[in-house]
Image (cartoon, helix red, strand yellow):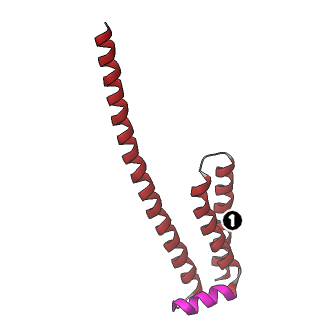
Amino acid sequence: MDRLLNVTTVLSVVLLVMVLISVRRAHIRVEYSVSWLLASVVMLVLSRTRPLLDAVTRLTGIPDSPLTLFLLTGSVFLIMFFRFSIIMSHLRDDNIALAQRVAILEYHIHSLRNHEA
């Protein structure tokens, strides 16, 4: 079980470093990186503090500590993926509306040029 917690620690540190590098290079916006940073820090803290993980295990009623860690981590990532799906859907709708506005403006410009000529 300690090996599994060590693997979880390594994965959370890798995720933390990847997010920080992505923010630094402007590959991800800061407001979106907060969720990822929070998830990786929670995963890191739970994998390194065994008493806290055992307390969460008792509170949730899950029979095994590593299972608790992975269920919590999976739940957090599932919620984050859903949140980002909503954001992407809004962006798609905004892009469609913007394309329609550009098309309308191009039509008006074209009609103004035809009236001037």
Residue farthest top in this picture: 117
Q: Which residue is at a point 59% across and 87% down the rendered structure image?
A: 56
Identify residue type, mark 1. Answer: Val
Q: Is residue 106 left or right of residue 68?
A: left
Q: Quadrant of residue 1?
A: bottom right
Give the residue drawn at x 58%, y 63%.
Answer: 35
Helix, strand or loop under label 1: helix
Give whichever of 100, 2 is nearer the camera. 100
Residue found at x 68% / y 76% = 45
**Residue at the spot of label 1:** 13
Position above or below: 112 against 34: above
| The magenta stretch spans residue 40 | no
Q: Tell me the magenta residue range.
A: 51-61
Residue 115, compared with residue 87, is above or below; it is above
Q: How crowded is mark 1: few (under 14 residues within 10 Å), some or many (20 or more)?
A: some
Instruction: Tell which of 91 and 22 is nearer to you.
Output: 91
Q: Hey, which quadrant is residue 116 in on the image?
A: top left
